[in-house]
Each structure stands twice: as structure tokens, then as C-alpha cells.
Amino acid sequence: MPPPVRRKTIVLVLVLGAVLALASVAHAGNGGFAPLTPHSPNARRINDSYVWISIFAGGIFVLVEGTLLWFVVRYRRRGRPRTVEGPQIHGATRLELIWTGIPVLILAAIASFVFYKLPGIQDVPAAKAEGGPLRIQVNAHQFYWQFTYPDGSISIDELHAPVNRTVRVDITSQDVDHSWWVPELGGKFDAIPGHRTHTWFKADQLGTYRGRCGEFCGVFHAEMKAVVDVQTRAEYTAWLSSAASDLGRSEWQGACAKCHGPQGEGGYGPKISNNALLTQAQGLEQLIRNGRNKMPPVARGWSDEQVRSLVAYLKQKVYKGTSSGG
Ligand code: CUA
């Protein structure tokens, strides 16, 4: 073995080491490579499975790529004629058993770990001490999330929940397929019209957790963001009692402003702040319940109370009066 090859091998190993070191730095700062820090037991178990699988995947990647690079250098042509054949070898029983046995063991280790974690990810805890989980309905619409609480309160795009409380969310869709996804609080769940799926979370920390629709559902898919506001129990209760008075604003921001602009000044959808229809309760109800042309029926499935809240809000806060100039 001539010394230059060894030197190059050393360089390769060092480069590989540097790459791995950089990757771990990026991982520490989470530069977008690793999942967000989980804040719910189910999300934590999903994360554990991710880490466990990554250990094997990372090891295999280094082994395969390292061997590849090593062979490329070690067995390069060195000026031999292209027609020269290497020694022909047939069968290596021991080696073949090893490279079959090890992957089988790896897959068994991965599968066992994931199946061990699965019930803790999927099954909603009974939460008997608290009288069962808090149940919140999630109803996806083009292009917002509607949340209904046990007392009938409703919010749009902002889910309020008490900290350290098991929350079961039942998910469905009013129109097309969407997907409920709050990475820090658990996995991704399809929202399918006419069908109900469920998941749960138990947030371990106060704060705001970001979610988004995980399924392409139309032009405003990217605006279908949700926020889970995890509050103290007192804050949550206080919020519930104020939810009804805030419903109109919540509906405006979630269902209307994304298209028509924050002040109704127009955006993807037309300017509406000077449209007299905003003051005509019946015509307006028709429009939002049934949609028209490109406008989706944003209020499909709404209660009369919900429609009244939005109509009142539009009249008071959005309508600026018809003007010949505007
Ligand atoms: Cu809803 Cu994408």
C-alpha cells in the first residue's frame, strides 16, 4: 500500500468527521433539520421514535457512504488497462449471513420500539381524575379552522386550551380534505368531510403553539394556520366567558380578511369595505352561507348565532360607507 492513499483516506475521514460535527451543531440550534421540541406526551413519543430511527439511519448512512468512498480510493484503477479483470469470487456464507442477519435485527429493533410507543401516541388517556378528557371539535373549512368547546363556545383559528389537561380533539371537514397539524402537540390528522378522526394532546407548558393545514386544499391553503393558546385554567375559563363577544372578530379574521384584506380593502378577493351588502343582513347571510363564483361558502354549517356575530361585526367594524370616489 503506497503511503499517498493512506493520507487521502485520512483526509476523507477528517472531512466526513467535519460534516458530522457541523450537522450536530445545526441540530443543536435545530436549524430546521430536527423536529420541534415536543410539548405533549404523544408528541414526545413520536419524537422518541424519530430519534431512534435516525440513529440507525445515520449509522447506516455513514457506513455505506464511508465504505463507498474508501473503495473508490482504495480500488481505483492506478493505470491498469481497462480490460483487466479482478479475481472472481463466489459465495461467502459467513459474510452473507452477517449482512442478512444485522438488517433483520435492526428492523426488529425499530419495529419493537415503535410498537411499544404506539399506544401512548394513539390512545387518548382516560384522565379519570379530571372527569375525562376535555373535548373540542375541530372543523376545517376553506380556509380556516373552527373550534367548538364543550359549552358551545366557538373560536376561529385560535384554539384555547388549559395547560396540563388532556384534550381530545375530534376532527372533521366542512368541504374538502384538510389536515390538522400542530407539530409540538402531536401528529398530523386528516380532516375529511363526512368523517371524524381524533387525536389528543396534553400541553406541558403555557404558550402558543403553531399549527397549519398539512394538506393542499386550495388557493388559501398557506393561510390556513392555527394557533393553540395554552393558558392557565383561570385564563381559559375567563376566555370562555368572553368568547361569544369576540366571535365576530374571530370570524372576520379567519374567514374573510385573508381574502378581502385586514380592513376589507381588498386583496385576492374584492374590496368590500364600501359594499352596501355589508349592511344587508339577509343578502349577506345568503352570500356567506352559499358562496358565489370564487368565494367559498365560508359560513356553511354555521349556527344563526355565528352568522349574526359576523354580520354585526361587518356592519360595525368593516363597513366604511359607500363612497362614489371609492
Ligand atoms: Cu386546508 Cu390546506
Image (cartoon, rainbow, N blue to C red):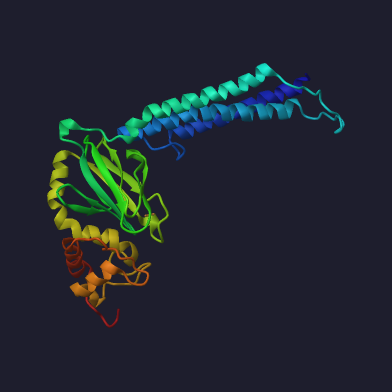
For the question of whether residue 158 can be seen, the reply is yes
Q: Quadrant of ligand 1?
A: bottom left
On screen, residue 72 versus residue 260, left or right, reads right
Q: Indicate the position of residue 301 as horizontal and vertical percent values.
A: 25, 60
Instruction: Say how many tags the image has.
Output: 0
Q: Nearer the viewer, residue 66 or 322?
A: 66
For the question of whether residue 264 can be seen, the reply is no
Q: Indicate the position of residue 264 as horizontal and vertical percent values.
A: 29, 68
Q: Is residue 106 above or below residue 83?
A: above
Corner quadrant of residue 91 = top right
Q: Is residue 27 above or below residue 258?
A: above
Q: Nearer the viewer, residue 127 or 17?
A: 127
Residue at the far top: name it.
94
Q: Is residue 119 above or below residue 135?
A: above
Q: Indicate the position of residue 33 as horizontal and vertical percent values.
A: 47, 38
Q: Nearer the viewer, residue 308 or 14?
A: 308
Q: Is residue 284 above or below residue 240?
A: below
On screen, residue 42 versus residue 321, left or right, reads right
Q: Indicate the position of residue 215 as horizontal and vertical percent values.
A: 41, 51
- Quadrant position of the N terminus in the picture: top right
Corner quadrant of residue 34 = top left
Corner quadrant of residue 181 = top left
**Going 30% across and 51% down the picture, which residue do you hit?**
172
On screen, residue 123 versus residue 148, left or right, reads right
